[in-house]
Amino acid sequence: MGKNHITIHDLAKVLHLNASTVSRALSDHPKISAETKKIVGKLAKEMNYRPNALASSLRKGSAKTVGLIIPRVNRNFFASAIEGIEAVLNKAGYHLIIAQSNESQKKEEACINSLLNARVDGIIISISWETRELAHLQMILEKKGSASI
């Protein structure tokens, strides 16, 4: 297994279990024995297994992540806003991804595409000084369905 990322399938192969059993053991499913959970957990630690957050978010339909697009992170206002936004999101069990538009509409559009590709649950945006067209913001509504601007 000379690859960088160990998967549930790798653990299952070593343990001669199926991947769904390994997955359930790692998520502390009640139908999996304590002994199996212990064995799976030990191997996962030894092999430095890290859950694939994207795969998990696809299965669950939620990444528990919100994207924040701001013009520049080094402004006092945005630094304070980030602190408050992150505190509220963390209390609700969400993580924050921050992107900078550098006051460019093209960069803002690229940030939105990257965040949508990362399957964020929502996007908070302070539009750039350069932004005049809003089609890229409409795209958020179309991709997310229930999102609002």
Image (cartoon, helix red, strand yellow):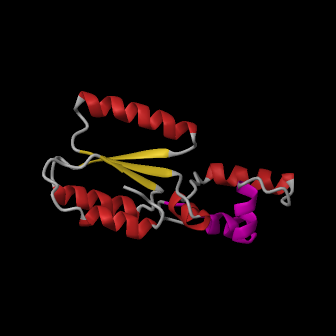
Which residue is nearer to you in this view: 13 or 66? 66
The residue shown at (60%, 67%) is: 59
The residue shown at (39%, 65%) is: 141
Q: Would residue 66 be found to the left or right of residue 91 on screen? A: left
Q: Would residue 4 be found to the left or right of residue 6 on screen? A: left
Instruction: State whether residue 28 is above or below residue 75.
Output: below
Residue 142's x, y, as percent? 39, 70
Q: Quadrant of residue 51?
A: bottom right
Residue 27's x, y, as percent? 71, 55
Most distant residue in the front direction: 149
Q: Would residue 43 be found to the left or right of residue 75 on screen? A: right
The residue shown at (81%, 57%) is: 36
Residue 32's x, y, as percent? 83, 59
Q: Would residue 10 be found to the left or right of residue 130 on screen? A: right
Residue 7 magenta-highlighted: yes
Query: Which residues, given as a range, are shown in magenta?
Result: 5-26
Instruction: State whether residue 55 is above or below residue 105.
Output: below
Residue 106's x, y, as percent? 17, 60
Which residue is nearer to you in this view: 82 or 133? 133
Which part of the image, by quadrant, shows the C terminus? bottom left
Which part of the image, by quadrant, shows the N terminus? bottom right
Q: How many marks?
A: 0
The chief SS type of the magenta part is helix
Residue 28 magenta-highlighted: no
Which residue is nearer to you in this view: 72 or 14? 72
The residue shown at (72%, 63%) is: 22
Q: Quadrant of residue 133?
A: bottom left
